[in-house]
Amino acid sequence: MTNLIRAALVVVAALSVAGPAAAADKFLADRHIERGVKCESCHTGAKPDANVDMKTCLQCHGGSYQALAKKTESDDINPHETHLGEAQCVTCHQGHKPPRLSCDSCHEFEDIRVP
Ligand code: HEC
Ligand code: HEC
Ligand code: HEC
Ligand code: HEC
């Protein structure tokens, strides 16, 4: 094997380790921070905790559930207009861990992905 090919293989190996793993490390809060959102924009209390009320999220995302639902109305099943009503955002969207689709405690919507 020439040195050139060996070097190329090392690069490919490094990419396949760093690529998907690095993307999976970015949770919702990290992606917000990258766009200039501050901790305090989501954590309005004296210090950050797990209670982030939907009112805080909605201040930047449409102002109301109805406005938010308009953005996703072309989905087969609109995740923002359901028989659960106005659920807290964090039942699906998580700040610092993988998201989950709360619906799947009863249903199995395999093709719905929560960002
Ligand atoms: C200070 C404003 C602000 C607050 C507060 C905020 N966001 Fe965002 N959010 C943004 C911006 C800016 C973007 C990037 C532009 C866009 O997609 O609208 C974004 C993008 C998103 C996205 C889509 C893009 C992605 O990376 O997943 C989701 C989902 C989201 N926010 C959910 C939430 C939730 C849930 C909360 C509350 C826990 C929240 N946001 C609080 C400003 C905010
Ligand atoms: C039942 C689970 C669930 C709840 C509760 C929920 N979302 Fe979502 N959200 C989703 C899913 C699923 C998507 C992806 C939809 C898509 O890709 O079309 C999404 C997408 C988004 C997006 C990106 C929309 C875009 O334009 O692409 C934003 C912003 C967002 N949600 C904010 C919120 C906020 C703010 C709340 C609370 C007020 C909330 N969500 C509550 C499941 C949920
Ligand atoms: C987009 C909104 C958003 C941003 C920005 C954000 N967080 Fe959070 N944070 C959350 C949500 C939602 C939770 C609730 C638990 C979860 O979903 O991970 C949380 C939970 C926490 C908790 C409590 C953890 C627990 O499980 O008890 C701490 C501490 C925290 N965040 C610190 C921070 C710090 C520090 C920053 C800035 C570097 C930050 N957060 C930025 C949304 C955000
Ligand atoms: C606590 C259990 C439970 C949860 C959580 C739940 N559902 Fe349901 N869902 C049901 C039951 C029960 C029915 C009615 C029986 C049936 O049709 O299977 C139903 C029916 C439906 C239907 C078909 C009938 C209709 O009302 O249009 C859709 C679509 C649906 N759910 C979507 C969702 C979505 C999206 C979520 C998450 C935001 C969700 N469900 C969360 C239990 C649940």
Image: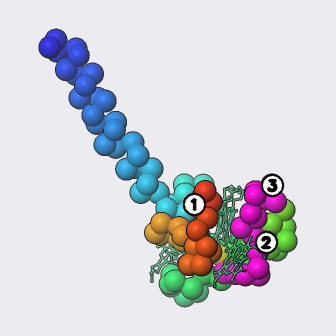
The crowd level at tag 2 (other Cα within 10 Å; few <14, some 14-19, many 20+) is: some
Q: Amino acid at mark 2?
A: Glu
Magenta span contains residue 105: no
Q: Amino acid at mark 1?
A: Glu
Residue 85 falls in image quadrant: bottom right
Residue at 28%, 36% (x, y): give it: 14
Of badges 3 and 1, nearer the viewer stands 1
Q: Does the residue at mark 3 contact the one at mark 2 (Cβ under 8 Å)?
A: no
Q: Indicate the secondary structure of the residue bearing disc 3.
A: loop
Cα–Cα span, label 3 and label 1:
18 Å
Q: Which residue is mark 1?
A: 110
Observer-nearest of 57 and 85: 85
Q: Which residue is mark 3?
A: 74
Residue 112 rendering spot, x and y as whole percentages: 62, 60
Cα–Cα span, label 3 and label 2:
12 Å
Q: Amino acid at mark 3?
A: Ser
Q: Does the residue at mark 1 contact the one at mark 2 (Cβ under 8 Å)?
A: no
Residue 69 falls in image quadrant: bottom right
Residue 36 rendering spot, x and y as whole percentages: 60, 58
Residue 2 rendering spot, x and y as whole percentages: 16, 11
Residue at 41%, 57% (x, y): give it: 25
For the record, the magenta segment spans: 72-88
Observer-nearest of 104 and 79: 104
Q: What mark, if any, has residue 81 been given in the picture?
A: 2
